Image (cartoon, rainbow, N blue to C red):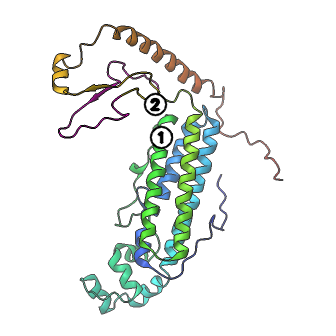
Amino acid sequence: MFYHVKDLQFNARVSRPDPRFANILLEQFGGENGELAAAMQYFTQAYGAKMPHPDKYDMLMDIATEEFSHLEIVGATIQMLLKGVNGEMKYAADSEEIMQVMEGSEKRESIIHAALTANPQFPILSTGGPRLTNSQGIPWCGSYIHSNGDLTVDLRSNLASESRAKLVYEHLMKFTDDPYVKETLSFLMTREVAHYKMFEAALSTIEPNFPPAVLQADPRFTQQYFNLSKGDNFRGPWNEGEMPDMGKEWEYIANPIVHVRDTNGLTEQPEDMDEQLAATKKLDEQMSEMKSDEVISSEPEGVAQWSDYAAPEKES
């Protein structure tokens, strides 16, 4: 159940109209890294988490709902940046000067000219209101959403999503000098950082959470680093010393071609691998049973009911 409160979460304000920036800001309304994408991603991920991880379901739904509120903030800001566009469109729809702009004229004195030159579809198809597209007019798409049904995978996707969104807001602030708009963008950017830390903390409470999903990595192919480029070769903790949290040493393959040939396409491995393979197979079975039981044991018997409709606690 959603209940809409008409007040914005953050007091979004605009000093003056700016149709060009309104068009750019569409990236965070209907773009790949925007607020709608984040809201729908966390909203859909929450379903699979409901039974085995009710605490993570609660977190995902809370953050998804906040992302919807951020979408409202972005949409409201876009609309305020387009102040005057609706009226100008209705008044000047057939003016010769606007037709000149559409044909490439350099005359951009009015705000409607600015809107048309930024993205003609934006003011023409919606008369200036925010649409679910990015700044190029490309419609929002469900393929933006990453929801894989494994919470450890989904949470890692969310860390990347929040990182990208934070970066977009950081770049957007370079394209406006309106102090009120910058204040709004700074708030939205900072909430991306807060959400990142929430997802990071949630992931740390799931054990084991590596490798993602159920099956373990094949010990024959886990620790090799293949030097697959010519030129300066750099060494670091990603290809020498101990692998992070694995208890193994990196094996640096300086000449991959020779190594692949000598091992018959990586199929001939040292005999001591047999013991490790057996241990991996046993762990696969244990993890499969554990993950399966985790979900099955959390599912209610009899009629399935999503909510229990218990009396809510009174607010203090």
Mark 2: amino acid: Pro
Mark 2, residue position: 212
Q: How many residues crowd mark 2 within 10 Å: few (<14), some (14–19), many (20+)?
A: some
Instruction: Judge left or right: residue 26 versus residue 74.
Output: left
**What residue sits right under mark 1 in the picture?**
156
Evaluate if marks 2 and 1 touch, with contact meaning CB atoms under 8 Å apart: yes
Quarter holding residue 54: top right
Residue at the image point whose x is 62% and y is 24% from the top: 297
Q: Magenta stretch: residue 80 in it?
A: no
Crowd class of label 1 (few under 14; some 14 to 19; many from 20; radius 10 Å): some
Counting residues from the start of the chain, the first of labels 2 and 1 encountered is 1
Side of 41 relative to 253 (left or right) = right
Residue drawn at (38%, 79%), measured in percent from left and top? 115
Q: Where residue 22 sits: x, y (%)?
A: 44, 73
In percent of width and height, residue 289 lies at 53, 18
Residue at 54% from the left image edge and 64% from the top image edge: 186
* The quarter of the displayed image where residue 103 is located: bottom left
Residue 1, visible in the rendered structure: yes
Q: Is residue 12 above or below residue 253?
A: below
- The reply to whether residue 26 is visible in this rendering is no
Most common SS among magenta residues: loop
Q: Amino acid at mark 1?
A: Arg
Q: Which residues are magenta?
A: 211-240
Q: Secondary structure at mark 2?
A: loop
Q: Does residue 238 belong to the magenta stretch?
A: yes
